[in-house]
Amino acid sequence: MKYYSTNGNSPKVSLQTAVVKGLAADRGLFMPERIPTLPKAFFNNIGEMSLQDMSYVVANTLFGDDIESGTLKNLVYDTLNFDIPLRHVSDNIYSLELFHGPTLAFKDVGARFMARILGHFNRHNNNDALVNVLVATSGDTGSAVANGFLGVPGVRVFVLYPKGKVSRIQEAQFTTLGQNITAIEVDGTFDDCQALVKSAFMDKELNEHMKLTSANSINVARFLPQMFYYFYAYAQLAKRGQDLSNIVVSVPSGNFGNITAALIGKRMGLPIKRFIAANNRNDIFLNYLNTGVYTPKPSVATIANAMDVGDPSNFARVLDLYKHSHEAICKEISGCSYTDEQIAETIAKTYKETNYLLDPHGAVAYRSLEEGLNPEETGVFIETAHPAKFKSTVEAIIGEEIDIPDRLAAFLNSDKRTIELPASMDKFKEFLMSL
């Protein structure tokens, strides 16, 4: 399988090159040149399969040309060594809880898979060159990547995050690790952090100085494994005997890696009827749906901070999947946008009525289903992170104290170690060139 750039001005490359480079030479994002479909028999038996078995079949269908099956199976099984429960919340709405991994956030799967596949390629090629992973985070990406790559030989990770714009627990999960993890506190927004990472990849002098790759969802090895979630949601609905003909999935959307993976899963044969891209006040995609014009703008800080993205990178992949057809995109994806007040209202109301505690990001997706699901449809929303990661925000909304899981509390007891930088490429480059 070859991977091409969404900008169309770079040669096609192997999976290994796409993973190691992260970004194409023309600043485009890599996409698989073809999307293979799964046999119908797979879906007939999917309700009887484990998360690991099912994910391996999906992974082998997509990556089987590039990674030996036994190796790929080990990668998948090692990545998915935790549960992803589907919980009934209300009426015909279910929550897919993706926060049962090491950092209690949905990005654990992609980060762990990428760490293992990058390590595999390095070992396979007997490559002793140090790989430097750059990752911008608006919240959970940094913690998932940092913990996924912690202690991986031959890899050094730099997490760039916006100063004062992530929760205390999120910050502690990547600023207290040490070893091969360096946290960089940028005086700016997530979009500034993302721009620094992209600029670093395009800097010839910097790339001659050090080997760079990204662990943001711009990297194919980070975003593609997220499709496992959606196949598993379908599998669990099948196991429960639910009607599978009208499934609607709502995805809290920031940088659009998660929903893009879901859309590729649909191209592989996953029979999801339609998707909702649920946004906070950063409503760039909703504006595109309404107008047909993509107009990025500075991000706005909200209580659903991991979605505070004003120029989502993976929008380029969405356009590419649908051949830039606004009409085709609107047929399969709808959008919505909610204020902080509406998010808080949803958390409080749902907790009071169902005793289910949403995090701010899951609340956006849940509300979209409450307001937009038809009676004959079954809705699944993505619950992206444990509510305790937003402890002060959630407690203020529900008026109760919530427990912090032990694995989160452990991070809070460690010392914060960061490097502070302005949102300046010159300063960022100067820092990296000094290493």
Image (cartoon, rainbow, N blue to C red):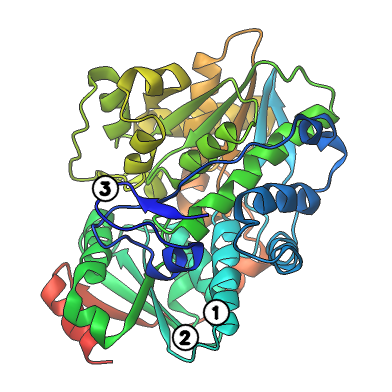
* In this view, the mark in front (2 or 3): 3
Mark 1 residue crowding within 10 angstroms, few (<14) / some (14–19) / many (20+): some
Residue 285's mark? Answer: none
* In this view, the mark in front (1 or 3): 3
Residue to which mark 1 is pinned:
150
For the residues bearing labels 1 and 2, Cβ distance under 8 angstroms:
yes
Above or below: residue 433 compared with residue 261: below
The residue under label 3 is which amino acid type? Asn
Between discs 1 and 3, the one toward the N terminus? 3
Mark 2 residue crowding within 10 angstroms, few (<14) / some (14–19) / many (20+): some
Residue 180's mark? Answer: 2
Between discs 2 and 3, the one toward the N terminus? 3
Image spot of residue 360 (x, y percent): 48, 41
For the residues bearing labels 2 and 3, Cβ distance under 8 angstroms:
no
Residue 7's mark? Answer: 3
Image spot of residue 255 (x, y percent): 37, 46
